[in-house]
Structure formats: C-alpha cells, structure tokens
Image: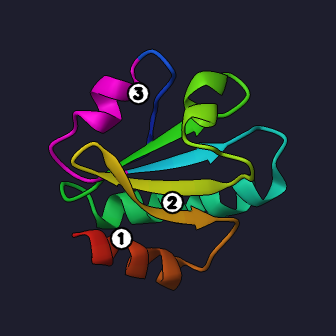
Amino acid sequence: MSKPTEVNDSNFDQMVLQSKTPVLVDFWAVWCGPCRMVAPVVEELAGEYDGKVTFTKLNVDENPKTSSQYGIMSIPTLLIFKDGAPVSNIIGFRPKAELKKNIDAVL
C-alpha cells in the first residue's frame, strides 16, 4: 500500500508543482483532531489511486511559507494540484466517497 509522502517548504515546488501526475496535499498538524480522522482515509485512497495520483502531507506548523502561500486557514485542508496549480480544495473532515468524487473529477 502506498503511503502519503511528507513534503515541506523546501521540496514543495519539486514534489508537487512539477509533478507529472495530480497531487493531493493534506495540510495537517499534530494537534489537529480532524486531521487524525482524515489521515487513515487519505492513506486508503493513496493505495487505491497508486500510480494515478500522488499523495502528500504537509505539516502546517513546520512549513508556514507554503501554508500561507496557499491561504490555509483551517485544517485539515486537502488541495489537489494538477499541472502545478490547485484545482480542488476540500476543507475539514469529509467522507471517503466525497474525497473520491473530488479526486475523480480531476483525473
């Protein structure tokens, strides 16, 4: 099973913006309860979409530059990037089926 890759301020451009496949970025923090609820769902989806979508996680406390660049005000926020631009924005915990709809719409 594929697990989300940790990204940070220094490798975000290379790992997300320059990716040939769509990238889902899970903006999260250790202290965030809903983030811990969405994490296993994101991991399941990473396995299901292996090879089609790249799944990443960005800790907002450790990476303030990227978080502020994309206006992350609430977490968890899931941004889906395609061709270097955010194309889908999901804020808060959402059921797996809803996340799949957002991902499928980008593919």
Quarter of the image that includes the C terminus:
bottom left
Q: In the depicted view, which residue is nearer to us: 8 or 66?
A: 66
Residue under the point 54% across and 49% down:
26
Task: Give yes or no for contact between labels 3 and 1 (Cβ–Cβ under 8 Å).
Answer: no
**Could you tell me if residue 1 is visible in this image?**
no
Instruction: Find the residue positioned furthest to the top.
Output: 10
Mark 3 or mark 1, earlier in chain: 3
Residue identifier under label 2: 42
Q: In the depicted view, which residue is nearer to us: 75 or 85?
A: 85
Instruction: Find the residue positioned furthest to the left.
Output: 20
Amino acid type at mark 1 = Ile
Mark 1 or mark 2, earlier in chain: 2
* Whole-percent x, y for residue 52 in the image: 20, 59
Amino acid type at mark 3 = Phe
The color scheme shown is rainbow
Q: Examine the rendered structure and indicate whether residue 37 appears above or below residue 2.
A: below
Residue identifier under label 3: 12
Q: In the depicted view, which residue is nearer to us: 41 or 27?
A: 27
